[in-house]
């Protein structure tokens, strides 16, 4: 029980780090404000926020998975396959609501498969989800024949382009999902069990947490959130492209780690991840406005990932003393 | 009484066969190769022709060379996801050298050097940052790919002179693969470095306590992997006759597939060069069979993914079987 408590306090909202990130974001806004006149305009900011809502929703799922000690590289393919299935079923004359439910079920099954392979068959999370990712991408190309699916009902684009009370719907959805998951992770039993599973699976197991069940559920959550994001993404273009979400997994992992989620699990929070998503995307938006080649973004994102994990590792090795003290306390 | 004895003996021999299947991954995979070969051979009458066999060796060569580097990384309880992107980066740099008219030997030297240097960078980052190889190489995978695009401007290079195609034609790719296999089989078996790799994979802490220079060995492992990616890039250029920055996408999956099929375990400390080669052969046979049976290329990823999942399941079963036996 003590173990779970320490894990929880570690996973709580770390004020200092997030403030530094926010200061960095503010500095970037100031810099870009001088460098380019169209960056700090309400129009540009609203556009970027609308565009990043899918990334943020996927990143929230990824954060939950990483906190539980896992990793999910298949989110991009789930983003692509769900609207494709829904569109194809609707094109064959199925009720659209039914088609959406069917597609979401497929996503849940994919998450379940990932979870079972990792929890029960002891696959390494990255390798297991890399394998399902490869297989799924190929399935998408088989079912769509490599062409974008565009059979969607009228009004489907409202999801991505509509507004409620002046706010674009995707931004509202992003905020709602963030608040719900921030609440789940900090204030429910499930959230605490996720931290416990990632922090120390053996201890969690002894304390009575069904870690296999937690592991499987986080992959289902991640797949469902990715499916949701995929639906928003396809409604923006009213088309489900077979190569959608190609780099999403990498981008959201980078955002989550930048936001303070630890790659070894047990530590991280939703607000941090959202800040990570904001920083990554406003920087890339700034690059675009400055006319920097899109290929540089891959290099930049990779370097940010390296810096973030390097910093995380430093912080962890600095935290060894605390761990030893905890052990000593437990021994007494 | 006699019946009982024979039944017992039968059970024993049955168990012997089963345990052999479980304990010698090479045997399992040879069995699979034979089954797949017979299956494709029955369906297609050009499968067992000399041209096709040569074709298969050409197809296998790139993946085979890369997967030996991957094997090194996995045995040491790591993995190298950057191999495909590194191949593209080496291709891009080689392409620019070829365009300014550099001689073939210089291109080869630069390619191998660049591959080794990038691999060394991977290893150095892993050691320095103290981060799992899988994360570091996930990052460098994107960095290398980005550099390949920026360097080449996204353009293709074609119309290569014959000097550069030599490494991808006839029996040359097969010979390069064979030489690589022999060299690394010797290294893994008879050199200190080879034994250190296994030791680190089995138990890194004990290896460190036993006085093994773990950090140095890790850098060398990833340098070898990068070097082999550079070599594979040369075969790739020769085989396709074109250089594009999108080359090698997904090659890390093929290499991981070959290694785990060949019995290299993600738990570390286990695996052999011969097994990895056999794994690459099986992957190549599956892809060749798909072409011969006119199955759409869209299915390629599905087959790779499913094969890897099955191979990993077999590995898990093997571990569980051993655990149960010990009890």
Image (cartoon, coloured by chain):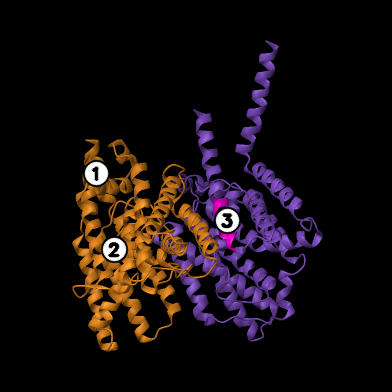
Callout 1: residue from which chain?
A: A
Magenta residues span: B298-308
For residue B304, say whether it is visible.
Answer: yes
Say which element carries label 3: helix
Quadrant of the image containing the C terminus of chain A:
top left
Say which element carries label 2: helix
Residue at which label 2 appears: A273
Q: Find residue B176 and report its horizontal and vertical position in percent.
A: 71, 63
| Dot label at residue A4 | 1
Q: Is residue B124 left or right of residue A271?
A: right
- Binning the other alpha carbons within 10 Å of mark 1 as few (below 14), some (14 to 19) or many (20 upward) gives some
Rendered hue of chain B is purple
Q: Earlier in the sequence, mark 1 or mark 2?
A: 1
Q: Is residue A302 above or below residue B42?
A: below
Q: Which chain is orange?
A: A
Closer to the camera: disc 3 or disc 1?
3
């Amino acid at each position: 029980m003590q173990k779970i408590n320490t894990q929880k306090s570690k996973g709580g909202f770390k004020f200092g780090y997030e403030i530094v990130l926010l200061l960095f974001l503010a500095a970037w806004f100031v810099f870009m404000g001088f460098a380019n006149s169209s960056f700090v305009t309400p129009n540009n900011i609203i556009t970027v926020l609308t565009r990043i809502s899918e990334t943020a929703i996927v990143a929230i799922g990824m954060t939950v998975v990483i906190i539980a000690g896992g990793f999910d590289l298949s989110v991009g393919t789930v983003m692509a396959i769900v609207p494709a299935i829904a569109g194809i079923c609707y094109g064959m004359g199925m009720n659209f609501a039914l088609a959406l439910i069917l597609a979401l079920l497929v996503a849940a099954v994919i998450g379940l498969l990932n979870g079972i392979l990792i929890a029960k068959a002891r696959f390494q999370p990255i390798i297991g989800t890399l394998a399902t990712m490869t297989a799924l991408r190929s399935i998408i190309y088989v079912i769509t024949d490599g062409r974008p699916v565009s059979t969607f009902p009228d009004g489907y684009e409202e999801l991505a382009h509509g507004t409620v009370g002046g706010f674009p719907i995707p931004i509202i959805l992003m905020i709602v999902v963030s608040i719900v998951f921030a609440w789940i992770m900090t204030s429910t039993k499930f959230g605490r069990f996720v931290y416990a599973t990632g922090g120390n699976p053996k201890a969690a197991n002894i304390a009575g947490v069904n870690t296999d069940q937690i592991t499987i559920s986080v992959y289902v959550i991640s797949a469902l959130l990715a499916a949701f994001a995929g639906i928003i993404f396809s409604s923006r273009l009213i088309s489900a492209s077979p190569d959608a979400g190609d780099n999403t997994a990498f981008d959201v992992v980078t955002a989550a780690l930048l936001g303070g989620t630890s790659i070894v699990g047990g530590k991280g929070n939703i607000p941090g991840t959202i800040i990570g998503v904001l920083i990554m995307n406003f920087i890339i938006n700034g690059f675009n406005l400055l006319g920097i080649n899109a290929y540089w973004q891959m290099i930049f994102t990779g370097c940010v990932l390296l810096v973030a994990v390097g910093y995380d590792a430093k912080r962890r090795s600095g935290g060894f003393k605390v761990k030893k003290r905890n052990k000593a306390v437990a021994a007494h | 009484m006699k019946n009982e004895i024979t039944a017992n003996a039968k059970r024993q021999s049955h168990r012997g066969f089963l345990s052999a299947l479980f304990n010698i991954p090479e045997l399992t995979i040879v069995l699979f190769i034979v089954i797949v070969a017979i299956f494709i051979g029955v369906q297609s009458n050009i499968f067992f022709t000399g041209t096709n066999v040569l074709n298969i060796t050409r197809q296998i060569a790139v993946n085979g060379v890369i997967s030996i580097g991957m094997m090194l990384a996995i045995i040491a309880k790591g993995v190298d996801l950057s191999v495909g992107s590194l191949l593209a980066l080496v291709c891009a740099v080689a392409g620019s050298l070829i365009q300014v008219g550099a001689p073939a030997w210089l291109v080869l030297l630069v390619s191998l050097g660049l591959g080794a240097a990038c691999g060394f960078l991977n290893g150095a980052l892993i050691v320095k940052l103290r981060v799992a190889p899988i994360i570091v190489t996930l990052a460098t995978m994107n960095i290398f790919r980005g550099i390949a695009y920026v360097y080449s401007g996204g353009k293709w290079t074609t119309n290569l002179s014959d000097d550069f195609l030599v490494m991808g034609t006839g029996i040359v790719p097969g010979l390069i693969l064979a030489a690589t296999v022999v060299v690394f089989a010797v290294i893994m078996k008879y050199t200190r470095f080879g034994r250190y790799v296994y030791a680190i994979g089995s138990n890194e802490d004990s290896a460190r306590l036993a006085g093994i220079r773990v950090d140095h060995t890790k850098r060398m492992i990833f340098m070898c992997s990068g070097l082999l990616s550079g070599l594979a890039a040369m075969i790739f250029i020769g085989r396709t006759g074109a250089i594009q920055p999108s080359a090698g996408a997904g090659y890390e999956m093929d290499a991981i597939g070959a290694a785990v099929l060949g019995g290299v375990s993600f738990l570390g400390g286990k695996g052999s060069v011969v097994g990895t080669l056999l794994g690459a052969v099986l992957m190549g046979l599956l892809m060749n069979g798909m072409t011969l049976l006119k199955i759409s290329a869209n299915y390629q990823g599905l087959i790779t993914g499913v094969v890897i999942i099955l191979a990993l399941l077999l590995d898990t079963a093997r571990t569980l079987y051993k655990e149960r036996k010990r009890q």
